Image (spheres, rainbow, N blue to C red):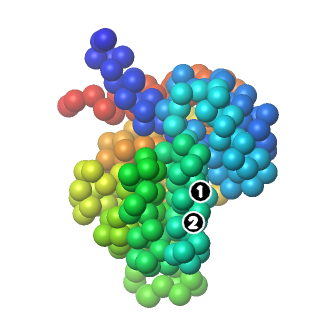
Amino acid sequence: MTIENTLLKEAKNRLIFALDVPGRKEAESCVKQLWKSVGCFKVGLELFIKEGPDVLKAVRDNSSADIFLDLKLHDIPATVQKALDSASAHEVRFITVHSCEGQAMLETAGEMHSRGLNVLAITVLTSLSEKELPALGFREGLTLHQLALDRAALAKEAGCAGVVCSGNEVAGIKAQCGPDFKVVVPGIRPDWSEVGKDDQSRITTPGQAIERGADLIVVGRPIRNAKDPKQAADRILQEIAQSLQPA
């Protein structure tokens, strides 16, 4: 295997495609088209609420990719624990919980590792801008960067496998929490992508996210809205692979 092919294989394992589509039929179409270029498919609230666990089976039946169940669980510890128990039965590799309810809820993640389920804590949503923090009750002078770092430290102490954050916080979280603590970055916008009206306020390119230390990146609209989604995914793989090349 050539160096180039090795890098492309690693790049594929770092790319998560967001299945933000209306239903199972559209999800299956995306999986069949993209699974050779994508290492993991993310199933979010819209699709999971409509189709339930059946859509997870559809991903497994049509690809060898991992599944990222992005439900952003946020409840009392006992309820979150039961939800994680249920998720572990569906061969899911990643699942998300919110980090803003403190350590007790996050600690429910600890025993999931032995079942192959990686619990990722959401630090700060990439749609949130810094000017919104005071209205949400945060202390004056607190930055999004510091808030993300504080929540990442809490998640690591509680036993989470990693966090989800914007590309702006990756380097700081890696420096603080260590190389084995997974960092997943959404809000990815390649320079060449055209996604129209966007609700993301803190974005980075695939190359920037990887160079800053991201373990995985989540890409949705730049692939889904492209004229040729497979070509767009392969173009992102090339950008990731280029960023992985030794200096």
What type is the residue that disc 1 sits on? Answer: Ser
Left/right placement of residue 72 relative to residue 116 reads right
Query: Regarding mark 2 in the picture, which secondary structure is present there?
Result: helix
Q: Observer-nearest residue: 139 or 21? A: 21
Question: Where does residue 10 sit, x and y in percent of width and height?
Answer: 37, 29
Which residue is painted at 54% across and 22% down in the image? 36
Which residue is painted at 54% across and 59% down in the image? 85
Q: How far apart are marks 1 and 2 (CA)?
A: 6 Å
Near mark 2 (Cα within 10 A), the count class, few <14, some 14-19 or many ≥20, is: few
State if disc 2 and disc 1 touch (CB < 8 Å). Answer: yes
User: For the N terminus, which image quadrant?
Assistant: top left
Q: Which residue has dot 2 on it?
A: 82
Query: Regarding mark 1 in the picture, which secondary structure is present there?
Result: helix
Left/right placement of residue 23 relative to residue 11 reads right
Which residue is painted at 79% across and 51% down in the image? 50
Number of numbered markers: 2
Quarter of the image where one finds residue 110: bottom left
Please say if 88 is above or below 239.
below
Tag shown at residue 86: 1
Which residue is painted at 54% across and 43% down in the image? 91
Whether residue 73 is visible here, answered yes or no, is yes
